[in-house]
Image: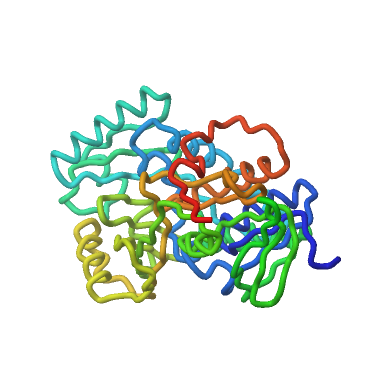
Amino acid sequence: MPNIYDAIVVGGGINGGSIAYNLAKKGKKVLLLEKDILASKSSGAAAGMLAAQVELDEDGPLFALAKESRSMFPSIAEEIKELSGIDIELVNKGMYKIALSEQEENEYKQIIDLQQQAGEQAEWISQEEIRRREPALSNAITGAMFIQKDGQVSAPKITEGFLKAAAVLGVVIKEYTEVFSFQVENGKIAGVITNVGKFESDTVIVAGGAWTQKLLSEAGVQLQTYPVKGECFSVRTHQPLITRTIFSPGCYLVPKMGGRLLVGATVKPNTFDQTVTVDGISSLMEKAKKLVTSIVDAEWEKAWAGIRPQTGDGLPYLGEHPKYKGLFIATGYYRNGILLSPITGEIIASLVTGESIPIDLTAFRIDRHVKTNV
């Protein structure tokens, strides 16, 4: 039957694409469903930072997962380029976490010590040295934590790359196909019901970002997730203002190809409203000007907003649902969705096929907060 598949992936963002791609690599017949157009939500709006060390300070389960996923990007870039022809624009020049006060400087130096003890590269760069490396940075900066291994990609390109590579391997992709509910038989997943009909499979993976909870609620499942709105803007210059990503509290600047500079991101929890506001963009502009004064002369390009999925404890949900056999969930990545996409695809594909996983998923298990109403 044409509507029967080995696995159905719900969500056409980067993690849905990575999961479908990895399942297809294992020879599975896969259907991917997206209720809008592909990469139309947070995957297309992200800055593409691979900030395993800059954003994650503690040597915990998420830190370990992020570092492992970060190491996979060079091979992923090659695979995607070979299969789809898409360059994900992987840049491995490192990243600066900027200090604007003595308090921040002391805090970052402590983080450097902790990360070095964990065997990671991290070093403190003085004000004089950081301004020698990045002359456009302002005198307000007292120094920076430099992470050599943190980098960046084009979020839209890698999302498109995963999806196109998946399609090359045989994944069937359907846009404008909204999943209304799950088919469940004797406690096991049997398929999904959509606006265009039923699709059958004993394996369904929900990777719908901030919209995952809405769909799971239809099955009586409640996770501790909530949406977080982030607004960004971009400018263009003839000469790059900075050569590496600049990260500071409340504002980051990510240099892209072609003289583009992405500036983000605001944080507004508990809303699905993707409106770009004057308040949000003006606050980002003020913060960006404090870091790079000459940004005021850059050419305006555009502004946008994305909705990111966050969890109550800040850790993603990754694994099989404890009650419904065959229902897998991958959500709650907040600002780490791009970074964690390679490892997410591998983990879910291995769980589906029953292969062993050399990673402890206890901290990310679905049942740590899950409530079922049916």
Which residue is rendered at x = 18% and y = 34% of the image? 106
Picture quadrant where residue 105 is located: top left
| Furthest-top residue in this view | 117
Which corner quadrant holds the N terminus?
A: bottom right
Which residue is rendered at x = 58% and y = 46% of the image? 323
- Residue 11 or residue 245, whichever sits in front: 11
170 vs 364, left or right, is: right
79 vs 315, left or right, is: right
- Residue 170 or residue 112, whichever sits in front: 170
Q: Is residue 273 above or below residue 372?
A: below
Q: Is residue 250 above or below residue 92?
A: below
- Residue 24 or residue 332, whichever sits in front: 332
Picture quadrant where residue 285 is located: bottom left
298 vs 42, left or right, is: left
- Residue 48 or residue 337, whichever sits in front: 337
Q: Where does the image place residue 171, in percent across and percent down from the top left?
A: 74, 61
Q: Is residue 236 visible?
A: no
Picture quadrant where residue 162 is located: bottom right
Q: Is residue 48 visible?
A: yes
